[in-house]
């Protein structure tokens, strides 16, 4: 066994691309080694903004030799009429380095036995440039020099070492060797690696912490130490920590400060300036109040750190000056004036203005408010918030810090005398802002957020602006996923088709499929039975909350003893009804057996209470009451009776069964084998 090091040296990679890039490199290397039958123990990843590296541990010295049988022509065409080998069989055998007489007849086909020798690791690894590095893909590319090659950033150097031996290959004008490079400022020299095993220990000597997890731990420890020393509270925000970790090779944390006068500006504005714009960690005092300080991380050591502190403070103050100015100036504006100006702001050229979008949202929100059972006061709050909820887009603060959309709307609305519900809804209508983001807490905010998302999706689909593949410029997938999560959280039970049905034909079906795909994605993140998810999604009632609840209920019962026979009985009913459509109504007086009467009685009793039952109670009732009656019916009744009237009556009864069960799920899609 041996070890192999591959390092790709680059110009600075954007922070958000470092982790995905090293993960991709490791995955491609793993696939490459497996395809070439070169065994290994594990792949260790290293990354900084200037390098992507992997260390393959326990690598075999050669690939595995294998014996395989290659399928050739059929026996029918192997020989001609005179019994001589045909051209087809001769060509096949030559291609396999054999003669026709060497072939083996198995069944109707000839096979060639083929032995493939193992290949030395060094020979296989010499193809890494073309087979691994050159095939990497990115969301952002750069082209340099006079070549057509594209990569995330220009390649500066490549290290390729099998233990102490260079595995040379060329990629453009870069030849792989044993020389890495130290920190750009602290050790801007070539670093000779005599052995692949030296990498993890040699690079820190040159001020490069190549282990991303070790570097992140070091950053965390330094920040927490500074916070403890100053008696501050600090949160190591996961995304911010990841970003900072991917912009430094040798971290040194430091403390900066700003004039306490800026604390008069809302904390959210200050935090946005520090965290989102400057990559600083905000700090709080022991009472949980924002302190006039911050912690940042330098890509270097502590030498002349005071100059770094002053530079960062100067940059931050410039942003805080802008924030203070906008905060004061925006308070002079009137909400109604800003709302009026929204008529001239385009929502989308094909759709209309923001004012028109808000008007449609208001209508949808009114319907949702009724569905959600809001009080009259809450309905008034929904109407008011829908009238004004986009006004902050025209404020100076949001113009400068667009991350504060909604947040500043709430602040300014409260200052203008709007009540807490209306103000909160203005902030909450953007929620969730990410796949797992926070959801609205207030009923009014949830209704407004859902209505805004419904109108956005319907409007874009209506003008043909539909996501395709990975292309989703208007974030409609996120909007639908957020809508589903809101409906599920608020436990609103209504048929979403009530809103989608205003679109006819192709658009209508596309929207339904689009929403179903998002529901499916959310469910499959938690359930591993694709058939159960499909059954729930394809119920006859497009009640999103019910679909989600039903999927989990069915999954919870899938291993219970009555599950299989129950699903089979319902499926049998569905299949019979599909093949034999009946337009008749059930006539109980025409029943010829007790089995028919028993099934009818169960169906009628369930119809009376069905909509009030929870998904759990519905399923239990199906399994313990309805399905035994169905089974008894099939055992004692000939559905397809010769008498047409009798047959139609029995089909009508089964249609009632199917109508009832289909409102919960399409149980025929569940696999019971």
Image (cartoon, rainbow, N blue to C red):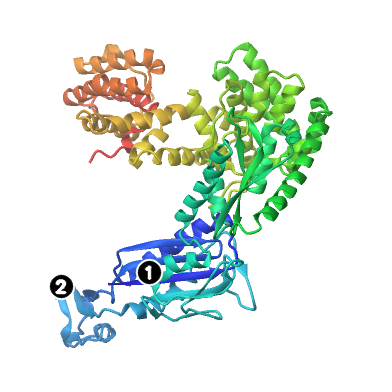
Instruction: Identify the residue position indicated by label 1 in the image.
Output: 32
Q: Residues within 10 Å of mark 2 (few under 14, many from 20)?
A: few
Name the image quarter holding residue 439: top right
Cα gap from disc 1 to disc 2, whole angstroms: 33 Å
Q: Residue at the spot x=42%, y=61% of the render?
A: 45
- Residue 665: tell me if it is visible: no
- The answer to whether 631 appears left or right of 470 in the picture is left
Q: Residue at the spot x=49%, y=47% of the render?
A: 221
Of the numbered discs 1 and 2, the one sitting upstream in the chain is 1
Secondary structure of the residue carrying numbered label 1: helix
Q: Is residue 62 above or below residue 581?
A: below
Which quarter of the rendered picture does the C terminus lie within? Answer: top left
Q: Is residue 319 above or below residue 116?
A: above
Q: Position of residue 69 (x, y in %)?
A: 21, 74
Name the image quarter holding residue 380: top right
Instruction: Identify the residue position indicated by label 2 in the image.
Output: 106
Q: Is residue 383 above or below residue 289?
A: above
Q: Position of residue 166 (x, y in %)?
A: 41, 80
In the image, 274 versus 307, the foreground residue is 307
Q: Residue at the spot x=28%, y=75% of the render?
A: 63
Q: Position of residue 333 (x, y in %)?
A: 83, 29
Which quarter of the rendered picture does the N terminus lie within? Answer: bottom left
Q: Residues within 10 Å of mark 1 (few under 14, many from 20)?
A: some
Q: Position of residue 244 (x, y in %)?
A: 57, 52
Between marks 1 and 2 in the image, the one whose residue lies nearer the viewer: 1
- Residue 220: tell me if it is visible: yes
- The answer to whether 634 appears left or right of 246 in the picture is left
Secondary structure of the residue carrying numbered label 2: strand
Name the image quarter holding residue 84: bottom left
Q: Residue at the spot x=73%, y=24% of the render?
A: 413
């Amino acid at each position: 066994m041996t070890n192999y090091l591959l390092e790709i040296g680059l110009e600075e990679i954007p922070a958000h691309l470092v982790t995905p890039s090293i993960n991709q490199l490791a995955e491609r290397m793993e696939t490459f080694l497996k395809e070439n039958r070169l065994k290994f123990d594990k792949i260790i990843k290293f990354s900084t903004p200037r390098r992507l590296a992997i260390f393959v541990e326990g690598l075999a010295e050669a690939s595995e030799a294998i014996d395989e049988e290659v399928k050739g022509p059929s026996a029918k065409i192997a020989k001609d009429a005179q019994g001589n080998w045909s051209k087809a069989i001769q060509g096949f055998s030559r291609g396999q380095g054999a003669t026709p007489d060497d072939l083996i007849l198995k069944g109707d086909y000839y096979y060639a036995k083929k032995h493939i020798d193992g290949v030395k690791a060094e020979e296989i690894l010499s193809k890494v440039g073309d087979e691994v590095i050159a095939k990497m893909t990115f969301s952002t590319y750069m082209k340099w020099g006079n070549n057509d090659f594209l990569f995330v950033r220009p390649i500066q150097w490549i290290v390729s070492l099998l233990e102490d031996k260079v595995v040379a290959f060329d990629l453009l004008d870069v030849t792989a060797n044993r020389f890495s490079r130290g920190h750009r400022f602290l050790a801007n020299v070539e670093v000779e690696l005599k052995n692949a095993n030296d990498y993890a220990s040699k690079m820190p000597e040159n001020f490069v912490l190549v282990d991303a997890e070790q570097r992140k731990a070091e950053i965390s420890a330094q920040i927490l130490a500074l916070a403890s020393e100053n008696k501050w509270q600090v949160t190591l925000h996961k995304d911010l920590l990841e970003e900072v970790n991917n912009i430094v090779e040798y971290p040194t944390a430091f403390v900066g400060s700003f004039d306490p006068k800026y604390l008069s500006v809302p904390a959210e504005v200050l935090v946005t300036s520090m965290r989102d714009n400057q990559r600083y960690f905000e700090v709080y005092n022991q009472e949980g109040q924002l302190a006039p300080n911050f912690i940042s991380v330098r890509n270097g050591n502590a030498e002349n750190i005071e100059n770094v502190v002053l530079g960062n403070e100067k940059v931050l103050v410039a942003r805080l000056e802008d924030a203070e100015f906008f905060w004061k100036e925006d308070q002079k504006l009137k909400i109604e004036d800003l709302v009026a100006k929204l008529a001239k702001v385009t929502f989308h050229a094909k759709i209309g203005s923001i004012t028109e979008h808000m008007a449609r949202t208001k209508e949808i929100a009114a319907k949702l408010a009724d569905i959600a059972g809001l009080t009259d006061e809450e309905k008034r709050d929904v109407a008011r918030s829908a009238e004004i909820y986009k006004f902050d887009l025209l404020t100076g603060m949001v113009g400068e810090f667009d991350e504060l959309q909604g947040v500043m709307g709430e602040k300014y609305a409260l200052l203008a005398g709007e009540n807490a519900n209306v103000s909160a809804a203005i902030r909450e209508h953007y929620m969730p802002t990410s796949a797992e983001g926070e959801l609205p807490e207030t009923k009014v905010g949830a209704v407004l957020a859902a209505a805004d998302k419904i109108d956005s999706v319907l409007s874009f689909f209506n003008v043909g602006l539909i996501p395709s593949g990975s292309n989703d410029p208007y974030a409609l997938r996120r909007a639908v996923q957020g809508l589903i999560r809101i409906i599920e959280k608020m436990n609103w039970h209504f048929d979403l088709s009530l809103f989608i049905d205003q679109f006819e034909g192709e658009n209508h079906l596309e929207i339904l499929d689009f929403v179903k795909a998002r529901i499916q994605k959310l469910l499959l993140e938690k359930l591993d039975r694709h058939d159960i998810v499909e059954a729930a999604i394809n119920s006859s009632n497009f009640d999103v909350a019910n679909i989600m609840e039903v999927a989990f209920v069915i999954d919870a019962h899938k291993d219970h003893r009555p599950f299989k026979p129950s699903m089979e009985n319902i499926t049998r009913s569905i299949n019979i009804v599909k093949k034999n459509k009946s337009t008749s109504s059930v006539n109980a007086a025409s029943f010829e057996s007790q089995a028919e009467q028993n099934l009818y009685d169960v169906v009628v009793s369930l119809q009376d209470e069905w909509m009030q039952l929870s998904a759990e109670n519905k399923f239990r009732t199906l399994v313990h009451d309805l399905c035994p009656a169905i089974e008894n019916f099939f055992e004692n009744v000939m559905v397809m009776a010769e008498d047409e009237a009798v047959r139609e009556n029995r089909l009508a009864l089964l249609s009632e069964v199917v109508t009832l069960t289909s409102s919960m799920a399409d149980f025929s899609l569940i696999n019971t084998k």
